[in-house]
Amino acid sequence: MSSIPKFEPVPTSTRRDQVAETLRRAILSGLIPQGTQLIESRLAADLAVSRGLLREAIRELIENGLATNRPYAGTFVTEVNADVLRDVYEMRRVMEKQAYTRLWPHRDAAFKDELRQRFEQMIEAVASDDLAREIRAEAHFHGLVYERCGNHLMPSFWQQMTQKIQLGFAICQIAHAPKPDFEDNHRHFLECAVGDSLEAMLAELDSHLDRGLATIQFEAGATPPSAGTLAAPAVSVASA
């Protein structure tokens, strides 16, 4: 007989998760700008939650790289500048090439179908004019190779990198920085990823990352817009 006790089903989403997701979306959409202090009393009141619960949600943001705790100062939204983005893209270039090289002989119909589905979801998200949805969909599309390459550390590395990439992308979108045709470039990336030539895929990956980095660096040093107010539930954030 097993010594493991019987557990009750765990709710799929806790209130802390909901608070963390609300703040995450606000940060990635630019409603809470980089460098903004996350004042617990203000946020707890706006979200109608306890400061303890809010603190747990903010701790999750810190673990995901979206917020940074400064001793004796407080917690602030992570700031992403051109140097940070270069470092992130340098690591992504190495890791994504390794992921595709490792996965390449094992790509099956399920992988190709899933990548095509994620591409369509991404294009639908772009057409929806919902910045947060678009950012998540692009990360979801590019994250598949990290999930399927067979290295169990890759998904967590991608999660850490993509938070900073998404912050840079949000800056670019909000500032309307010029960027190459999104759909055409990602469609070509998709064709290479499901194609027959690993050499062509790796070359396209280099080009794709170069275009992406150039785009989000365009406004990486610009001053973000002022904090806004979220809907359902409302969140207004003031810096100290």
Image: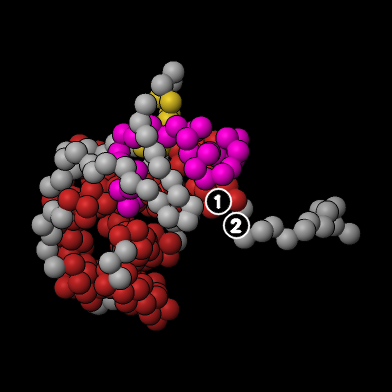
Residue for point 56% across, 44% down: 48
Residue 30: x percent and y percent? 30, 48
Q: Alpha-carbon neighbours of circle 1 within 10 Å: few (<14), some, or many (≥20)?
A: some
Q: Quadrant of the N terminus?
A: bottom right
Residue for point 45% across, 32% down: 39
Q: Amino acid at mark 1?
A: Asp
Residues 195 and 125: in front is 125
Residue 119: x percent and y percent? 31, 73
State the image quarter where residue 179 is shown.
bottom left
Q: CA distance from mark 2 to mark 1?
A: 6 Å
Are circles 2 and 1 on residues that touch, CB within 8 Å? yes
Q: Which mark is residue 13?
A: 2
Residue for point 55% across, 51% down: 17
State the image quarter where residue 34 is shown.
top left
Residue for point 36% across, 63% down: 133
Q: Which mark is residue 78?
A: none
State the image quarter where residue 148 is shown.
bottom left
Residues 35 and 197: in front is 35
Q: Which residue is mark 1?
A: 17
Residue 219: x percent and y percent? 15, 45
Residues 88 and 231: in front is 231
Q: Is residue 197 visible?
A: no
**Magenta segment: does it hold 39?**
yes
Q: Amino acid at mark 2?
A: Ser
